[in-house]
Amino acid sequence: MPEHIYIFDTTLRDGEQSPGATMNIQEKIRVARQLERMGVDIIEAGFPISSEGDYESVRAIAKAVENCTVAGLARANREDIDRAWDAVRPAKYPRIHTFIATSDIHMQYKLNMTREEVLRSIAEAVSYAKKMTDDVEFSAEDATRTDLNFLCEVVKTALDAGATTINIPDTVGYTVPTEYAEILETIRKKVKGVEKAVLSVHCHNDLGLATANSIMAIQHGARQVECTINGIGERAGNTAMEEVVMAIRTRADLFPYETGINTTLIYPTSRLVSQITGMKVQPNKAIVGANAFAHEAGIHQDGVLKEKRTYEIMTPESVGIPKSSLVMGKHSGRHAFRERLKALGFDLNTEQIQKAFELFKGLADKKKTVYDEDIVAIVMHEVLRIPYRYRLTYLNIVSGTSAIPTAVVTMEIDGEPVRDVDFGDGPVDAALKTIKKMTHSKSKLLRFAINAITGGTDAQGEVTVHVEEDGISALGQGAHTDIIVASAKAYINALNKLELQKTKKRESTMNQTARTP
């Protein structure tokens, strides 16, 4: 029987640290439940000490998830560990993941600690965490730039203190596969008792080697891989879960392992994370990119038509990409629509399904064909939106080669109808300027991007905007067959998220003031 490789997903922690990838609690819970459906073993839900919001989201995920271990990250000190434990304690399977840097450069310039002090901190932190839960993971931050003999001391110290999982992270994406293999083999040979723990790897992609390093690590004793959906994460990102999982599955002749991941949910999960974070997947991204199963060269097309295996080492269906993304039209019924939502990975209540179905019917009247991507956009942009302060009810644009672009906008603001008009350099600029004036927003528009969801001139346009005000930023998204309407919806979505974050910040400040003697 193939040996099990534990999949430790850190999309909600390390992945969220990607610039602009911030998620709210509802979005994090949605991703966590999708990861649970996929068959992930461990979900690292966040870094509870880092903020009140992170603490709340980790605790909410711990309550929502039933079949996965839920981990909270903590530095090697009691305050962090207490906070992490309080957040993950409601989980059926809680884990404390504590860490400290072990490389000379980190110890000297970041920690200002000696090796002896670091070893003492490890022993104290792990033994303290062990009093709370049997499941304790220890990470030696920047392990691949750590003196190898000292790294062995670090691992032995963590094991003796009670760590059940030992993570050897390539924190800055510095190592290469052969060097990584040597590090792991040395630890396995020199550290007595390491075979009783699960060896883990957490690779960053700064040199484009994260997946290669993770695969090499598995071949040299690692049995847990820490990764993210779409490879998102700090700087160049993390090991992409989909790449490791499909490498193991596709090359079973070399890798006698299994992961327990339902691979048919890989693509829907990729889309979900992309939609929530606003981070688009590059077209040539392995496994989940738009071109991953596309064939343009004549020789390739000829080969695939004769026998798919000539140029496809895995099938689109195996990762959840349907043979044809064309699913339904205006004559499709509610039952078929509900089943399609389930197939796309959405778990909606009756009210949400009804709303999605009505929007689907409206879109089907405008478009000749409705695609999976259209349905995903409906659910993400309209059904699962956060509670709003602002809502668009009417938009009319006058624009042309000899006309001054003019926008007439009607909105509901706190439930009250408001109408205004303004001009701009173009139709989108006019619409957004009008909305900004109506909402009295002081935010800056940092990024504006348009993407066609499907092909054809009747395709929905998907717009992503990034706004910032007083150090608080928010992503907004909107989709519509009219890209100007999509732009207005995306901008309003961002402003609603910004208002929500500003309210939370004010409440947090008031609570802190109230607690101050």
Image (cartoon, rainbow, N blue to C red):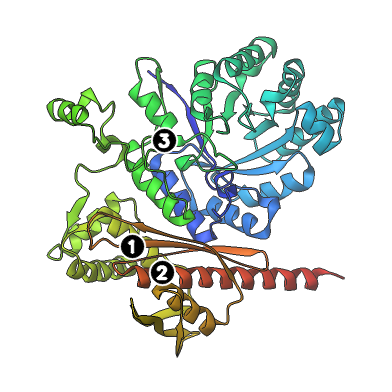
Q: In the picture shown, does residue 339 fall above or below 132?
A: below
Q: In the picture shown, does residue 148 fall above or below 37?
A: above
> Comparing marks 1 and 3, which lies closer to the viewer?
1
**Residue that carries the numbered disc 1 in the rendered image:** 461
Q: CA distance from mark 1 to mark 2?
A: 9 Å
In the rendered structure, which disc, 1 or 2, sits on the residue that comes first in sequence? 1
**Residue 56 left/right relative to 157:** left
> Comparing marks 3 and 2, which lies closer to the viewer?
2
Indicate the quadrant where residue 207 lies.
top right
In the rendered structure, which disc, 1 or 3, sits on the residue that comes first in sequence? 3
**Residue that carries the numbered disc 3 in the rendered image:** 242
**Residue at 67%, 32% in the rendered image:** 139
What label sits on residue 487 in the rendered view?
A: 2
Q: In the picture shown, does residue 434 fall above or below 298?
A: below
User: What amino acid is at disc 1?
Assistant: Gly
Q: Position of residue 302 (x, y in %)?
A: 15, 28
Category of crowding for the residue at label 2, using alpha-carbon neighbours closer than 10 angstroms: few (below 14), some (14–19), many (at least 20): many
Q: CA distance from mark 1 to mark 3?
A: 27 Å
Please state which of residues 98 and 132 is positioned toward the viewer in this rendering: 98
